[in-house]
Amino acid sequence: MALIETRDLWKSYRMGDEEIHALRGVSIAIEMHQHSIADNSWSTLHLLDLIGMENVGCNPDLGNLYWCYEEPEETIERCIVALAPRAKYWHCKQLVRVHVPEVQHAYYIKVPLPDGDMDYRFAIAAMLHAGYAGALAVEGVREGDQLYRDGKSVAYCRDVIRELGH
């Protein structure tokens, strides 16, 4: 028995005499997310293998791996290399980690993509190397001038992609 199964999924609309098929070629991306059944690369890959459908992939949200535990279970680099070939969508957030060992806890501050702890140049290169050609969405900051800070993330992504020859 499959964990997730879809059958005869379709939706069409009539526009005059023309029938419009709205769900032809639908893909599903399961987000790697803290405290879920897909919270690191190996559990996400296991879930995708159980589902076993070409149109079901992942959203390798590296920030969710990074802020999931006091100490991340795996490196960001290992995670993105493992998940990039199965990605169907990708949104990115960047974090600065403030570890407080006395209370066995870490706090995280969202920052623009070039300004945090994770190497998004490596991540973007890994995604492109795996053949990913889908969307790269920026999960924005919450504090300060959001338009300026998120614009900095977008400009960074464009620069990196151009520098990598894509």
Image (cartoon, rainbow, N blue to C red):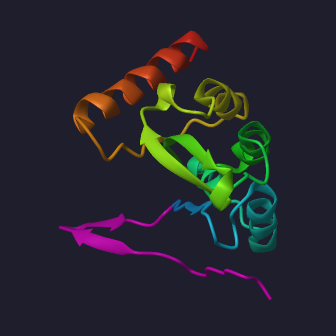
Question: Is residue 137 found left or right of 40 in the rendered image?
Answer: left
Question: Is residue 114 found left or right of 130 in the rendered image?
Answer: left
- Most foreground residue, 122 or 94: 94
Q: Quadrant of residue 23?
A: bottom left
- Most foreground residue, 146 or 2: 146
Q: Position of residue 63 (x, y in %)?
A: 57, 48
Where does the N terminus fall, quadrant-wise? bottom right
Q: Quadrant of residue 37?
A: bottom right
Q: Is residue 158 magenta?
A: no
- Quick check: can you spot residue 11? yes
Q: Residue at x 72, y 28 (%)?
A: 129
Q: Position of residue 138 (x, y in %)?
A: 42, 41
Toward the left, the furthest residue is 16
Q: Residue at x 78, y 54 (%)?
A: 73
- Quick check: can you spot residue 57? no
Where does the C terminus fall, quadrant-wise? top right
Q: Is residue 8 magenta?
A: yes
Give the main secondary structure, helix, strand or loop, of the magenta stretch: loop
Q: State which region is magenta.
A: 1-24
Above or below 44: residue 90 = above
Above or below 69: residue 160 = above
Question: Is residue 41 found left or right of 114 in the rendered image?
Answer: right
- Most foreground residue, 166 or 124: 124
Q: Position of residue 88 (x, y in %)?
A: 59, 51
Above or below 125: residue 132 = below
